[in-house]
Image: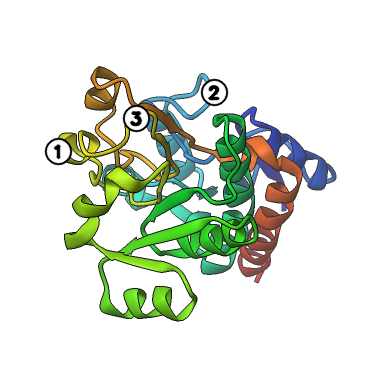
Amino acid sequence: MNICILGKDKRNQYLKELYKESITNILNADIIITPIPITKDGETVTDELITLDNLVEFASKKNKVVITGGLNDKIKEKLKDVKYYDLMQSDEIAIYNAIPTVEGAIKIAIENTNYTLNGSNICILGFGRIGKLLAKYLSSFGVNIFCEARKDTDIALIKAMGYNSISLDELNNNLSNMQIIFNTIPSMILNEERLKLTKNDVLIIDLASRPGGVDFEVAKNLDKKVLWELGLPSRVAPKSSALYFKMGIDKIIKENER
């Protein structure tokens, strides 16, 4: 099948190399692969001049298959007449994608602190794929790991894995002890009340997709160092990230060749 790959990030450039025998322009493509997220401003396709509305109209009228990701409810509604696949809804891809995210997050933490991770108190908000993997990687640095979770089953798993558990109700009582906080929850968790409880020199690294989990304006006013690190896989390990995506894309291509 003929493929058009949109976007200018390094991951999609590697994808173009991987599919170089099948690459064509958007008019002749059977499958259109968009950047992830598909849009940052809600209007234009990321790193492209084409508007999201024009892409949707073209894909629906010409029966193009769209492979994408980073979709909110509003974008899903726009795509309702398009045959599309959300790569980030694949558990396999999401797990692989967590690897460069975690490696990049640790690299950023090291670069933005003047002390060792070893012996540091580090809190991870959320115990999903990224939270679990981040805790595992950080444990090799000799970090005092504190993991926040809502579900009793996650709290039990955190304890079983040898980490310190924090329920959401206990979070406020623990924030003042943390030197680094990683957030993986894509909804407001570090609000004004909680930001005021953190250390003056705390480092907060938000790994959550839009809208993030930090009140960034309040954090700025409080002079808290907050880094919102979106798109880490395509930034820190674009070649590996492209190979992970290819696994999912190949399955979609095979499905549409039947």
Report the amino acid beneath label 2. Answer: Glu
* Crowd rating for badge 2 (residues with CA inside 10 Å; few <14, some 14–19, many 20+): some
Report the amino acid beneath label 3. Answer: Gly
Q: Which of marks 1 and 3 is nearer the N terminus?
A: 3
Q: Is residue 57 above or below residue 124?
A: above
Viewer-nearest residue: 244 or 51: 244
Q: Residue 42 carries which label?
A: 3
Report the amino acid beneath label 1. Answer: Glu
| Residue 248, x across and y down, in percent | 63, 61
In this figure, which residue is indicated by the disc labeled 2?
A: 48
Q: Is residue 5 left or right of residue 206?
A: right
* Crowd rating for badge 3 (residues with CA inside 10 Å; few <14, some 14–19, many 20+): some
Q: Which mark is residue 163?
A: none
In whole angstroms, how far apart are the C-alphas of marks 1 and 3? 30 Å
Residue 130 visible in the shown view: yes
Secondary structure at numbered mark 2: loop
Q: Is residue 81 left or right of residue 252?
A: left
| Quadrant in the rendering for residue 133 | bottom right
Residue located at (39% from left, 67% from top): 164
Is the Cβ of the residue at disc 1 closer than 8 Å to that at disc 3? Answer: no
* Crowd rating for badge 1 (residues with CA inside 10 Å; few <14, some 14–19, many 20+): few
Q: Which mark is residue 193?
A: 1
